[in-house]
Amino acid sequence: MSSDSLVCLKDFEKYAKEHLNRNSWGFFSAGAEGCQTLRDNEEAFRRLRLRPRFLRDVSVRDMSATVLGQRVDMPIGISPTANQGLASPQGEIGTAKAAAQFQTCMICSTYSNFTMEDIMNSSPDGLKWFQLYVRPDRETTAGLVRRAERAGYKALVLTVDLPIVGRRYPDLRHGFSMPPHLRVANLGNADLSQNKKDRNEALDYGMGGPDQSSDIALSWKDIAWLRSICSLPIILKGILTAEDARLAVQHGVDGILVSNHGGRQLDGVPATIEALPEIVQAAGDKLEVYMDGGVRTGTDVLKALALGARAVFIGRPAVWGLCYKGQEGVAKVLSILKEELSLAMALSGVSFSQIPAIVVSPSHSSTRV
Ligand code: FNR
């Protein structure tokens, strides 16, 4: 398939479905249980309408933004997804290079197939945040945090929605297996515990089995612990309610990434674009709010910005691009989204991505945000 025939992100999904084996496609595409939330993440965007304004001189559209004080060329970053080596031999390095090429932010998963240092060294100019799972063994966790800080990651993204891995039927039906050539690279390094248990626990993440690699006892008081061991800003990934957003403010975190883990954890929670407004409101100007989940078009991005997200992140679409042509494929996915956002801004009368358009719900209650 030539690059020209892939014109939207859904085309990349189709390509990946046709080219990945059952093991890898099952891992990347799965949602939890009946997949209501997985479907809803995309469908909820379709339920929102944009109200375009005209005669506003849209000859120059500025898509740049800042996230935690760092400038990015567009408000579209890449969320952490585990085991990108299943999509391409380039794995996370291909994704990181594409993100750097577009001067945007990549969040690297704890469960990458390259080490966080190799990913950073592949594209040192690109803004990168490190996604952290707090493990029961705090020394191992602290080791990961220290390495991220040393390697040049600019923030810690603490994933809070995975005390236990959700039930994903494709993985359970067919059994996920990690090909022997791939490593859980961050946990195999010399300054971390070398025991076999680590590798097996990390593999449980992919298998959808009980996940002892996350600390199920993690609670709000541990934010202070995390603060005490590192100086990086802390972002909580997976917050879905105003109540938790207020707690995040009280605990002094720096950002919230509104997320339901791409519909892979608790099925039946709201689509992230639906959860976003109450979190934006609760957070006020105390911290930055981002979102991921179901972002597939430039108009999706614009809707999220209009509802108060400072930036959006994509999970699966980056993996589909990686599967298509490594770095070049991820770059193509990013360029399509960027072009679509630019077009959506022009057609709705918005010149700056951080000055929102007006979104209307089907009930016609218009909200200026
Ligand atoms: C994820 N996600 C995820 N999140 C995280 O914090 N750490 C991780 O290692 C992973 N791994 C992972 C693997 C796969 C295959 C998927 C699909 C997702 C969740 C991810 O960061 C993000 O929240 C969602 O993917 C966003 O939804 P979309 O863009 O995939 O719809």
Image (cartoon, grey):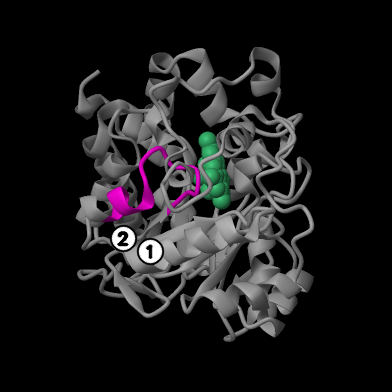
Task: Using the image as rendered, state which of residue 19 and residue 145 is in the foreground.
Answer: 145
Tell me if residue 180 comes above or below residue 193 in the rendering: above
In which quadrant of the rendered view does residue 336 lie?
top left
Left or right of 2 in this view: 251: right
Left or right of 61 in this view: 92: right
Tell me if residue 287 is in the magenta stretch. Answer: no
Q: Secondary structure at mark 1?
A: loop
Q: Quadrant of the N terminus?
A: top left
Tell me if residue 264 comes above or below residue 356 in the rendering: above
Q: Is mark 1 within 8 Å of ligand 1?
A: no
Left or right of 101 in this view: 231: right
Tell me if residue 134 comes above or below residue 58 in the rendering: above
Mark 2 neighbour density, 10 Å: few (under 14) some (14–19) many (20 or more): many
Q: Secondary structure at mark 2?
A: loop
Q: Position of residue 74 (x, y in %)?
A: 32, 63
Q: Which residues are magenta?
A: 108-120
Residue sitting at 33 percent across and 34 percent down?
A: 321
Nearest to viewer (mark 2 / mark 1): 2
Left or right of 121 in this view: 364: right
Residue sitting at 35 percent across and 67 percent down?
A: 150
Q: Which residue is mark 2?
A: 104
Q: How far apart in space, not on screen, are marks 2 and 1 (Cα)?
A: 8 Å
Q: Which residue is mark 1?
A: 75
Mark 1 neighbour density, 10 Å: few (under 14) some (14–19) many (20 or more): many
Residue sitting at 32 percent across and 67 percent down?
A: 152
Residue 293, visible in the rendered structure:
no
At label 2, the amino acid type is Thr
Residue sitting at 30 percent across and 33 percent down?
A: 7
Q: Position of residue 86 (x, y in %)?
A: 41, 27
Q: Position of residue 303 (x, y in %)?
A: 51, 60
